[in-house]
Every structure is written in structure tokens, then in C-alpha cells.
């Protein structure tokens, strides 16, 4: 039986997007959902933000030397995403896979707006990116992400903390203010982009159960054919 094209993008696959602040738990949940979908026999492809090799080295060098303005930051990430979309997202969508994206164009909408770029201009740059079938927004207070970040002992980097914006000379304070900006943008987008809001302060098990329940109606007539692939 032929696969029914998605009403959102016209391809036989389905595009499932996970968005949220760093430390919201979205990456863990995306990985768990991918494995669950695979166990049910679905063809799954998993992809992450900033995974293109085209400009990743340029972005790293620019960050290291402090050369990136908000506009160049935005344009470089747009090139990176466009390459990732053409090479890693579009082919499995055309092939009828369930494509699980750990971050999508909404990450750019949020980060670029938080750095002062015009939101309408940013949306125009990413106009090639089709609307997903689901966008799961993992909403969590900034204080929780900060606590998780400090508990993980992972180094808080310069750009993650928004230090390039001069919000504060203190790394933790700058992180708190910048992540607050990001959360504000996510909350704003959630009202207009049909986000499925996930309370990310709950247990891993409770969140995963919610995700599976949400997707079951979509998957009722979706074809199976076991295969899980990853863009890494």
C-alpha cells in the first residue's frame, strides 16, 4: 500500500522535531523515542543540529577567535542547516522514514532573535525548511537548566552563555540572562507554530509516555520496515 504524503510537507515520511533549552532533556527523549519507534518496526533516521561538515570548522574557528557577529553567526548556521537538510533530512523523508530531529530551524529562530536579529529576516532565510509533523517543545525554567548544567560538570562555553552579547561579566549570570531570552522566544513561538508543549521538569518515564501517546494516532497506518540510522 502506498504511503500517504504528509499534509505538512508532501513527503511520505514524517518529520518529528525536538526543541528546547540546553539541559531540558530533549536529546535524551529524542534518542529514547527513536529506539522505541525502531522496536515497533518503523524506519527511523536520527539527526542532530550542527551536524554538517560543510561549515562546522569555520564556525568553530570563528567562535574560538571571537569573530562572529550576530548576523554572521546567523548566516553560517543557516548554511550549515541547509546542507544538513539537503543531505540528511530530505532524503529519508522522501524515502518514507520517520525523521527524528534533535533541533530544527526553530533553534535558529530562537537563538538569532535572542542575539538581536530580525525574526522575520531569519524566517525568510529558512523558508526552504518545511513545517514538521510534530514539534515537541521541552519547556523548563532556566533555573532548572542551570542546575542540571552545573551538576553535569560540563564546561559552560562562551557562546552558550551569551557572553558575546555583553550581558554580564559573570559567566553564570550571563548564561542565566541569555537562556532567559531563549526561553522567552520559545514561549513566543509556541503560540504560533503549533508546538506540543512538554513539561520537562517531570520524570523521563512520564515524558516518554506522553510522547508515545501523542504519536500513536499518526502511526496507526504508517508502514513499518525495521531500520534505524543516524547521521553521525
Image (cartoon, rainbow, N blue to C red):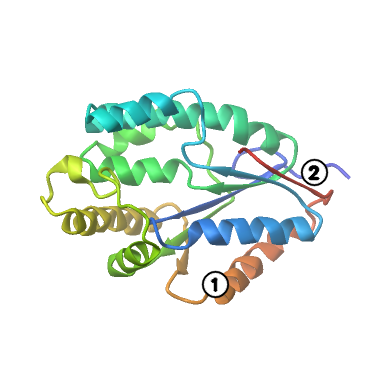
Q: Nearer the viewer, residue 4 or 224?
A: 224
Residue that numbered label 1 is attached to: 204
Residue name at image x 24 percent, y 58 percent: 180
Q: Residue 74: x, y in percent?
A: 32, 32
Q: In the displayed structure, does residue 195 sit left or right of residue 145?
A: right
Residue that numbered label 2 is attached to: 3
The answer to whether residue 141 shows anywhere in this view is no
The answer to whether residue 225 shows anywhere in this view is yes
Q: In the displayed structure, does residue 36 sit left or right of residue 142?
A: right
Residue name at image x 37 percent, y 40 percent: 108
- Quarter of the image where the C terminus is located: top right
Residue name at image x 33 percent, y 34 percent: 122
Q: Residue 203: x, y in percent?
A: 51, 76
- Quarter of the image where the N terminus is located: top right
Q: Residue 78: x, y in percent?
A: 41, 30
Residue furthest to the right: 1
Q: Quadrant of residue 120?
A: top left
Amino acid at each position: 500500500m502506498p504511503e500517504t504524503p504528509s499534509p505538512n510537507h508532501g513527503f511520505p515520511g514524517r518529520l518529528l522535531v525536538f526543541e528546547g533549552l540546553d539541559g531540558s532533556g530533549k536529546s535524551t527523549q529524542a534518542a529514547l523515542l527513536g529506539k522505541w519507534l525502531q522496536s515497533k518496526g518503523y524506519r527511523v533516521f536520527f539527526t542532530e543540529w550542527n551536524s554538517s561538515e560543510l561549515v562546522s570548522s569555520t564556525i568553530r574557528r570563528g567562535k574560538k577567535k571571537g569573530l562572529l557577529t550576530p548576523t554572521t553567526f546567523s548566516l553560517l548556521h543557516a548554511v550549515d542547516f541547509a546542507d544538513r537538510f539537503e543531505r540528511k533530512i530530505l532524503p529519508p523523508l522522501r524515502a518514507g522514514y520517520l525523521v527524528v530531529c534533535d533541533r530544527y530551524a526553530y533553534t535558529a529562530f530562537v537563538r538569532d532573535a535572542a542575539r538581536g536579529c530580525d525574526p522575520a529576516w531569519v524566517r525568510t532565510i529558512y523558508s526552504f525548511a518545511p513545517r514538521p509533523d510534530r514539534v515537541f517543545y521541552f519547556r523548563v525554567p532556566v533555573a532548572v537548566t542551570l542546575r542540571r548544567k552545573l551538576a553535569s560538570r560540563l564546561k559552560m562555553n562562551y557562546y552558550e552563555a551569551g557572553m558575546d552579547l555583553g550581558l554580564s561579566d559573570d559567566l553564570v549570570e550571563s548564561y542565566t540572562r541569555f537562556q532567559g531570552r531563549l526561553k522567552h522566544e520559545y514561549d513566543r513561538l509556541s503560540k504560533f507554530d503549533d508546538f506540543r508543549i512538554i513539561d520537562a521538569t517531570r520524570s523521563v518515564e512520564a515524558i516518554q509516555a506522553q510522547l508515545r501517546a501523542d504519536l500513536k494516532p499518526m502511526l496507526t497506518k504508517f508502514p513499518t520496515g525495521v531500520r534505524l540510522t543516524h547521521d553521525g
